[in-house]
Amino acid sequence: MSKKTLITLITPVKVRSNEGVVRQEWQPAGKIPVTLLPVTQELAYKYHGYTKTVKKRGFYKGKNQNVKLGNGIMDGETPLIIVSALDYGKVIDFLAANPDES
């Protein structure tokens, strides 16, 4: 049986330095309980049609507008980007990848 983990959702924001350089940073967008599992490329392709490398597959039961493509999660100290999200009404099934692999 899988155990739910409390994770932090993160959203991208643009930040401009004093020199006028714009860069992307991540800001927390709340905590949610999810079932977070390792995933193989075969399963990522079979269930999401996603062909790039992914690290985790998550299942979130509930409603949250921040569980969507382009946002991310913190897996411990590691940020992962949501690269695919399937909303089944009561459950969102999502894939998360390293930022440099998404």
Image (spheres, rainbow, N blue to C red):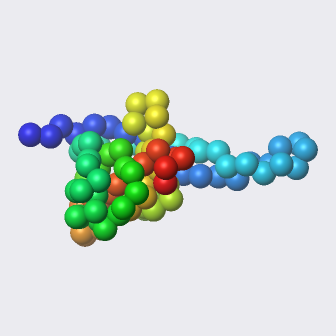
Residue 5 vs 46, above or below: the answer is: above
Please indicate, yes or no, whether residue 34 appears anywhere in the rendered image: no
**Point 70% across, 53% down: residue:** 14
Seen in the image, is 36 located left or right of residue 98? left
Which quarter of the figure is the N terminus placed in?
Answer: top left
Residue 70 coordinates in the image, percent (x, y): 50, 59
Seen in the image, is 76 located left or right of residue 40? right
- Picture quadrant of residue 18: top right
- Picture quadrant of residue 94: bottom left
Residue positioned most to the left: 1
Residue 78 coordinates in the image, percent (x, y): 46, 34
Seen in the image, is 17 located left or right of residue 41? right
**Point 83% across, 43% down: residue:** 17
Residue 28 vs 93, above or below: the answer is: above
**Point 36% across, 61% down: residue:** 51
Residue 42 coordinates in the image, percent (x, y): 24, 56
Residue 47 vs 60, above or below: the answer is: below
In this view, the residue in front, 49 or 60, is 49
In this view, the residue in front, 82 or 40, is 40
Please indicate, yes or no, whether residue 5 appears anywhere in the rendered image: yes
Residue positioned most to the top: 77
Residue 45 coordinates in the image, percent (x, y): 28, 62
**Point 29% across, 53% down: residue:** 41
Residue positioned most to the right: 19
In this view, the residue in front, 65 or 58, is 58
